[in-house]
Image (spheres, helix red, strand yellow):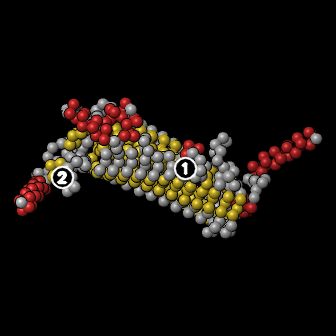
Amino acid sequence: MKKKLVLVTLIISSLIIISSFMGHNVYAGELQNLIDKTKSGDTLQLEDKTYKDHVIIRKPIIIIGKENTIIDGEKKGTIIQIKSSDVVLKNLKIMNSGRSRSSEMEASCIRNMAPNNTFKDLKIHNCFHGLYLNKGDQTNIQNNDIKGYKEGSTGAKGYGIYIKRANENMIKNNTIQYSRDGIYFEYSNDNEIINNKVSKTRYGLHYMYSNFNNFKGNKFIGNIGGAAIMHSDNIVLEKNQFSFNQGSQAFGLIIQGSRDINILENEFHLNQRGLYIEQSTLNLIQENEFFNNKVGIEVWDSSSALTFMKNEFKENKVPVVLVGHSNQNNWNKNKEGNYWQEPMLDLDQNDIGDRPYIQNSSLGNLLKQNELAYLFMNSPAIDLFERSHRLINPDVVMIKDEFPLMDNNHSLTLEKIIISIIVIVITILSVMYLRRSKR
């Protein structure tokens, strides 16, 4: 009996090894058979039905689905592996990958291991990793709806789009939800990330050891952290939205251990902290809007040579917090500072404040000593703490903008002052007249 069992095991093992050399799957289902029969360069049009299969694509083909075409992995392993370039997947619903991280190949709905492929108009649902690019350069990922498993802790989930050692990719117009991180980059350069929307994740974007990438027009809304750029250089973040990222340690955008980062014309709305910068240098923060954040910008003293110009601060609890000792950063460039949320005098109406904007807050020192202070940002105790500091240490300057910018919303012109005085005088006279008339 034992000899027969050993013989059967040897036969099965041999078949698997032979099939791997022949490029076929011994246990191939209907979809794998259709793929194997499709010639290189041809198009495979799938039917309006559900295929329960796991497939490997080893040649350049185009696979197109119909309205209700589904590829169901039945919550086991990776559903589609791609080992050829020039593969196109379009108009498919791919769902129910495995959830295990224990194997060498972490489960994905799609695992791409070759360059120059296209994934377009896909619904990728209930996946550990949604779309995993492993060394697949020049891949086009557009107009896809990617959702991880809703249930389970965030830390136990995978990434919506996982880019590992893959360069020159286009990631555009995708919607991502319910993953650990929406888009995760690792050692990947020269990528374009445009007009994606990421929500309900840990980090909407998580970016490690990757350089020369552009992020434009993306929306990172309702995450624990909007986007994290870490240990990466020469990045451009332009016209993105970082909003409603809440929690005691939440942020819209964190820049950590990175240099030559350009943060241009972004919106930071209703975050615990809008922009957080640590251990970074030579970054440009220009023409961004910080609205109704607990802290607009938090900068640690490990960062230097940062330039802030033409940013607009509106209705933040605190516009800027510097944590630690004063650092060598610039709050204006070429006589252009920032629009601060406190009205300032501009009597000569040259659109520059008559006096420098000065902030002598000590909130940064409090936060450095005890980060639990974030929990009390809306408390009157924080206001009392700040006022006490200003009385005790009026000469301690944390921020000095020599050229604060003015506009109709930020400036107190001579005309406004005169109008205000006239209104006050008329009000006082009206009150006095009404009192006399009653007598």
Callout 1–callout 2 Cβ contact below 8 Å: no
Q: Quadrant of residue 62?
A: bottom right
Quarter in which the N terminus is drawn: top right
Density class for disc 2 (Cα within 10 Å; few <14, some 14-19, many ≥20) is many
Density class for disc 1 (Cα within 10 Å; few <14, some 14-19, many ≥20) is many
Closest to the observer, 402 or 115: 402
Q: Residue at x 55, y 46 (%)?
A: 154
**Picture coordinates of residue 341, whole percent (x, y):** 25, 49
Does 410 sit left or right of 169 as displayed? Answer: left
Residue position for label 2: 411
C-alpha separation, residue under disc 1 versus residue under disc 2: 45 Å
Could you say whether the residue bearing mark 2 is in a helix, strand or loop? strand
Residue 3: give its label.
none
Residue 92 against residue 199 in the figure, above or below: below
**Picture coordinates of residue 390, whole percent (x, y):** 22, 35
Residue 179: give its label.
1
